[in-house]
Image: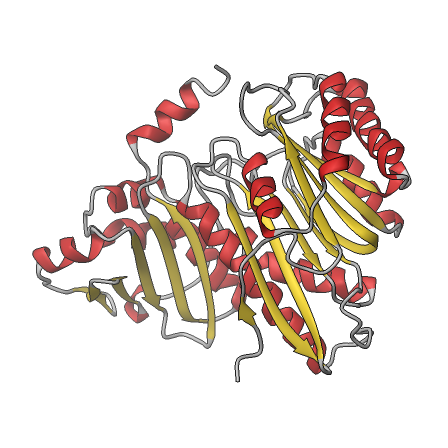
Amino acid sequence: MEKFIQIEGGVTAAEGFKAASCMAGVKYENRYDMALVYSEVPCECAGTFTTNRVKAACVQWDQNLVRSGRKLSAVVVNTGIANACTGKEGWDACEATAGAVEKCLGVPKDSVAVGSTGVIGMQLPVDRLVAGVETMCPILEHTAAAGTLASKAIMTTDTVNKEVAVSFELNGKLVTLGGMSKGSGMIHPNMCTMLGFLSTDLAIDRGLLQEALSAVVKDTFNMITVDGDTSTNDTVLLMANGLAGNDPITEKNADYDIFFEALSFCCRYLARKMAADGEGASKLFEACVVNAKSKDDARTLARAIVGSNLSKAAIFGCDANFGRFLCAMGYSGAEFDQNDVELFFVSRAGKLKVFDRGTPIVFDEEEALKIMKEDEVTVFVDMHEGTEDAAAWGCDLTYDYVKINADYRS
């Protein structure tokens, strides 16, 4: 029997979570650009944030909340303006937004997280943010539709919304975990221009919640890259309100393992969705490295493959130029012997070996083209030097990527 199953929904799937969205006019006109997620009871929360030393005001606000040990009641997100490099005004905007939630919903403002995404260096129109909160609070709903609309309201250059939900049983209690994310450009390992919000009705110790999220992010969100730029705004928040009624998880046991697997699935699902929706992308580009000497080597090699512009261009052009992928592996910093390496191209159309332990293989170019024309293409590498595996995800490099980013502020 499966430990968990995927179900319909996203951030509102778990018991007690509601969402609302609105057209606040933060930067865009005639599109949903604000979302609010609210829990009927305060949540234990965990978070991971950008490694960029230039951190948006909202990142600093949320880091303070997570590190304080306070419970979280709500999250407000805007798109269009990142609230990064905005000085005291940026911090004041966070406080005003959280204060508006406090006034409308009666929860402490220091229990409200905020998220922003969009153009760096612009000041947020605080009056519109406050008005947006006042619009959303009365229309909060615990419906799949409300969660879906929230996932659309946080998009910037994304072309599709990203949401996921799963359910599982613990001691006869149904537990649900759901979430949403956004991310399309300025995507690079160690978090990316991405926002992710996960909600569960699980009862769990706060320390274990943080430990699980930190571990899962390392092999999911930190393994995607679109363009090599690490954002100022990356935030992933995980909220747990305990309404499932399970025996609280206070140690690493079988219940924790099931939750960990469910969280890994959700984060991996969202990570792949973001990589496939990279700015201008036409293909999901995956690198799978197996039998490496160490986990760190496997991660390093996989990230190098999907992060190489030459590799990404080859994926776009359906060019089975395996030398580009080997080259990226060679400068990655991982130690290995090229005479141990096997390299394959894989997609729904088949699997083709092109390099075998130091020696190129004569292969059918037509078969390679057929494999690489699919919308999901994997470079599969067997290192034959250990037992550790890792996967990384990116996308092809297309003409549209330059077009999108050349006029991003317009």
Q: Position of residue 2 (x, y in %)?
A: 53, 80
In screen coordinates, is 318 left or right of 298? left
Q: Position of residue 214 (x, y in %)?
A: 68, 58
Above-or-below relation of 383 to 306: below
| Along the viewing direction, whichever of 384 and 400 lies nearer the viewer | 400
In the figure, residue 251 lies in which quadrant? Answer: bottom right
- Residue 330 seen in render: no
Q: Position of residue 124 (x, y in %)?
A: 70, 19
In screen coordinates, is 19 left or right of 65? left
Q: Where is residue 61 in the image (x, y as percent from the top left)?
A: 80, 36
Q: Which residue is drawn at 44% across and 76% down?
A: 386
- Residue 82 seen in render: yes
Please identify the residue farthest to the bottom as the structure is shown: 1
In screen coordinates, is 46 left or right of 337? right
| Along the viewing direction, whichever of 44 and 149 lies nearer the viewer | 149
| Along the viewing direction, whichever of 287 and 323 lies nearer the viewer | 287
Q: How is the image coloured?
A: secondary structure
Above-or-below relation of 136 to 203: above
In screen coordinates, is 101 left or right of 231? right
In the figure, residue 35 lies in which quadrant? Answer: top right
Q: Residue at x 31, y 50 (%)?
A: 327
Q: Residue at x 53, y 85 (%)?
A: 1
